[in-house]
Image: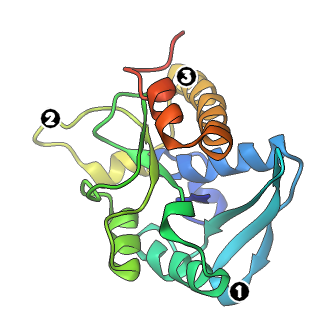
């Protein structure tokens, strides 16, 4: 599982760092800690989820160069792309909505574009998390928006979405993508 985000306290709770927050939640849930591995440009944590070995990765390359870190980890550990799961924010999904897919385009997400470029494939499983759909506003500053923090009401919803995403990841690991997609690819999180 690779959570995408930007390193540093300045970005910790921004919309763009939802991937980091989800893998942090998963690590806390299974009681494992991250260690910095400079040669992979990442923070890495390893553990078990119901007899399945898992590795959690938080690239420290900044979002637009995520592929550099992910390709190092994939190459060194000889990870099949079908065993990879990238967790990241999606501006085109409503706040709290999650989507699990086995493959697809980057949809304009620079971190995912970087990963696809480095791994030479679009067939990379992913969990996208909606951070608010404001694409109808043509004067919209995407960069400022994704680097902003959630407001109070949004933060409450995102905390629930993080819990839901953690459950979805466990379902992917234990029961496979098809079951996880049927169960979690809903319109948005229920209140």
Q: Looking at the image, do the residues carrying marks 2 and 1 touch, with CB atoms under 8 Å apart? A: no
* Most foreground residue, 149 or 134: 134
Spatial CA distance of label 2 from label 1 is: 40 Å
Spatial CA distance of label 1 from label 3 is: 34 Å
The residue labelled by disc 2 is 137
Q: Earlier in the sequence, mark 2 or mark 3?
A: 2
Q: Earlier in the sequence, mark 1 or mark 3?
A: 1
Q: Secondary structure at mark 3?
A: helix
Which label was assigned to residue 153? none
Seen in the picture, residue 22 relative to 7 is either above or below; the reply is: above
* Most foreground residue, 100 or 188: 100
Seen in the picture, residue 37 relative to 82 is either above or below; the reply is: below
Residue 174 left/right relative to 117: right
Find residue 64 and report its horizontal and vertical position in percent: 40, 71
Q: Earlier in the sequence, mark 2 or mark 1?
A: 1
Image quarter of the N terminus = bottom right
Looking at the rendered image, the disc whose residue lies closer to the viewer, 2 or 1, is 1
* Most foreground residue, 52 or 7: 52
The residue labelled by disc 1 is 38
Q: Give me the residue at 72% from left, 50% from top.
A: 24
Q: Give me the residue at 87% from left, 55% from top.
A: 32
Where is residue 166, by image quadrant? top right
Q: Looking at the image, do the residues carrying marks 2 and 3 touch, with CB atoms under 8 Å apart? A: no
The residue labelled by disc 3 is 157
Q: Give me the residue at 52% from left, 47% from top.
A: 14
Q: Residues within 10 Å of mark 2 (few under 14, many from 20)?
A: few
Spatial CA distance of label 2 from label 3 is: 23 Å
Q: Give me the residue at 75% from left, 81% from top.
A: 37
Q: Secondary structure at mark 1?
A: helix
Residue 27 left/right relative to 188: right
Q: Looking at the image, do the residues carrying marks 1 and 3 touch, with CB atoms under 8 Å apart? A: no
Q: Residues within 10 Å of mark 3 (few under 14, many from 20)?
A: some
């Amino acid at each position: 599982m690779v959570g995408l985000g930007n390193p540093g306290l300045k970005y910790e709770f921004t919309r763009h760092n939802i991937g980091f927050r989800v893998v942090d939640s998963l690590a806390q849930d299974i009681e494992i800690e991250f260690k910095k591995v400079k040669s992979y440009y990442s923070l890495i944590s390893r553990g078990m989820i119901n007899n399945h070995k898992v590795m959690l990765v938080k690239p420290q390359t900044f979002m637009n160069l995520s592929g550099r870190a992910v390709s190092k980890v994939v190459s060194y550990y000889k990870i099949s792309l079908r065993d990879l799961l990238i967790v990241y924010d999606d501006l085109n999904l409503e706040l709290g909505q999650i989507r699990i897919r086995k493959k697809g385009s980057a949809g304009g997400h620079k971190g995912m574009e970087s990963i696809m470029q480095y791994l030479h494939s679009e067939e990379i499983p992913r969990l996208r998390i909606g951070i608010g759909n404001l694409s109808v506003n043509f004067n919209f500053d995407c960069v400022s928006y994704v680097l902003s923090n959630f407001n109070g009401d949004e933060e409450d919803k995102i905390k629930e979405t993080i819990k839901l995403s953690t459950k979805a990841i466990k379902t992917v690991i234990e029961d496979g993508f098809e079951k996880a997609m049927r169960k979690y690819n809903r319109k948005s999180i229920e209140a």
